[in-house]
Image (cartoon, helix red, strand yellow):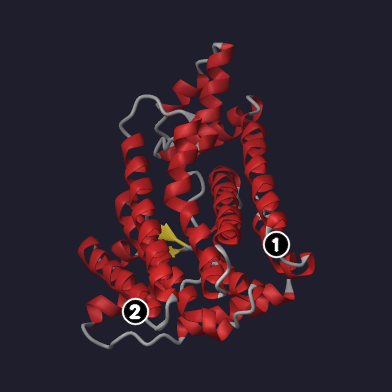
Amino acid sequence: MNELQTLTSYIEEQVSGHAFPATPAQLYDPLRYFMTLGGKRMRPVLTIIGGQLFGVSKEESIHAALAIEFFHNFSLIHDDIMDAAPVRRGKPTVHTKWNPNIAILSGDVLFTEAYKQLAHYKDDRLSELLTRFNETATGVCEGQQMDMDFETMSTVSKEQYIEMIRLKTSVLVGCAFEFGAILGRADVGTRRLVYNFGVELGIAFQIQDDILDLYADPEKFGKQVGGDMLSNKKTLLLLTAMELAQEKGDQRVDQLLSMSDPAEKVAAAQALFHELNATEATRLIQDAHYRKALQSLEAIPIENSRKEPLRRLAEFLMNREL
């Protein structure tokens, strides 16, 4: 993990060293605050490692990596507003610390910062980078809309949920990795394998996040544990529990959704989902997507030894602690 830690530190230095204007302070102070809250910087790391696979230095990849990270954080600021989330990475969200209007504008600035980073590439690769970035940004918005639509839908299938997280979360992971391949001028077939690795890893990562949301140690998770359950959010974990309960004629999941006491509801969900084997069934789906990601990684036509950083990164992401 030393190499990954070195790359993460490099990206952290670049992010923290990015100079936002001093004024208007109400616009830029929230960005300075939010961008120093940390995070794993997984997506920009993928961009740099993806570039290294094809002979691109981290110094050349860093602008594409920062574009990914700025866009990701833009989406987080806006998601927190829509979800009315009080905490992000263990600290107050931007709309909580300031207000929703300031958070909207600050997030918009991060979106434009992503384009500024991509504009550093003046050659023929810029068109490919912009095409993939724009497709990805549209997909993320579509996924977010699907997520919001699910709130008012009486039934959501597990297939619909997987498609939603593919768009909302995973296409950005795929884009991050493919950016490195674009910079390295990889052929179209190789780029597709690279992209698929990122997408499938992103799906597995998000499914794991659903599980962590209910079962994680709050000190390590950085978000409100049980937040999805408290809002009756239709995660894969909840949908799986509903399906298993329906098969058994068990009404307890329906009863769980109507509970009002937060602590009691989270504890009841943890126990019931375990009893129904919903947690294990959800992990099996996660593992299936993780294996698809590894299959795409193995198929990338470069030496196996050069893929080792990505194997280690994938393993690290799939072994986050509950």
Q: Is residue 246 visible?
A: yes
Q: In the rendered image of this protein, does residue 72 appear above or below residue 199? A: below
Q: Amino acid at mark 2?
A: Lys
Q: What is the x, y in percent for residue 124? A: 42, 77
Q: What is the x, y in percent for residue 98? A: 27, 68
Q: In the rendered image of this protein, does residue 13 appear above or below residue 223? A: below
Q: Secondary structure at mark 1?
A: loop
Give the numbered dot on residue 116.
Answer: 2
Q: In the rendered image of this protein, does residue 277 appear above or below residue 26? A: above
Q: Amino acid at mark 1?
A: Pro
- In front of the other: 184 or 24: 184
The quarter of the rendered structure image containing the N terminus is: bottom right
Q: Is residue 44 visible?
A: no
Q: Secondary structure at mark 2?
A: helix
Q: Residue at x 46, y 80 (%)?
A: 63
Q: Given the current orientation, which residue lies at the most extreme top position?
A: 249
Rendering quarter of residue 307 = bottom right
Q: What is the x, y in percent for residue 125? A: 45, 75
Q: Is residue 37 left or right of residue 309?
A: left
Give the numbered dot on residue 301.
Answer: 1
Sooner in the amino-acid sequence: mark 1 or mark 2: 2
Q: What is the x, y in percent for residue 150? A: 36, 35
Q: Residue at x 66, y 28 (%)?
A: 277
